[in-house]
Amino acid sequence: MSSAQTAQFGSPSKHKRLPWQTSKTSWTKISESVMLAGMAVSAAEPSGLWGTLKEPFASGSAVAAAKADASSTELIKAVIANLETSEGRSAVQEALRKQFTGA
């Protein structure tokens, strides 16, 4: 894994490389799932303007809680770290844009 990939995907374990650390496509799919879950929750039960405005804050709170949780896995922490960067968010947004455009 190159130093650029290590910066983007997180440091590999000292003992073994996890499967999600080896493929950019897999990494993008995993990162997309976080955004898609938030979108699905928001769309599942429309609750007017106020509810629509509150949903992103609820999703953000859930992500913050997962980040602070000591029992969160290495994968969860790596996905959150990736989405905290502008490059990570842009890559996921672009992948979702392509996916929905082709749908």
Image (cartoon, rainbow, N blue to C red):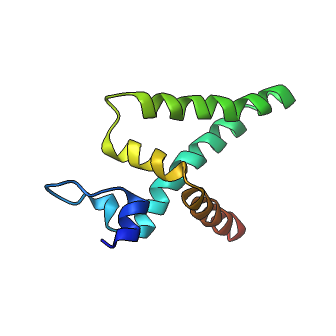
Percent across and percent down for residue 28 are: 48, 62
What residue is rendered at 86% in x and 31% in y? 49
Answer with left or right where residue 5 lies relative to residue 32: left
Corner quadrant of residue 66:
top left
Quarter of the figure that contains the C terminus: bottom right
Q: 37 or 79, which is in the foreground?
A: 79
What residue is rendered at 54% in x and 58% in y? 88
Answer with left or right where residue 64 lies relative to residue 102: left
What residue is rendered at 26% in x and 58% in y? 12
Percent across and percent down for residue 42 are: 69, 37
Q: Could one spot residue 17 in this view of the protein?
A: yes
Percent across and percent down for residue 92 are: 58, 60
Answer with left or right where residue 39 lies relative to residue 34: right
Q: Is residue 98 above or below residue 76?
A: below
Percent across and percent down for residue 96 are: 63, 61
Residue found farthest to the right: 49
Q: 18 or 38, which is in the foreground?
A: 18
Quarter of the figure that contains the N terminus: bottom left
Q: 32 or 87, which is in the foreground?
A: 87
Answer with left or right where residue 53 lies relative to residue 76: right
What residue is rendered at 40% in x and 61% in y? 7
Q: 11 or 58, which is in the foreground?
A: 11
Corner quadrant of residue 3:
bottom left
Q: Is residue 62 above or below residue 7?
A: above
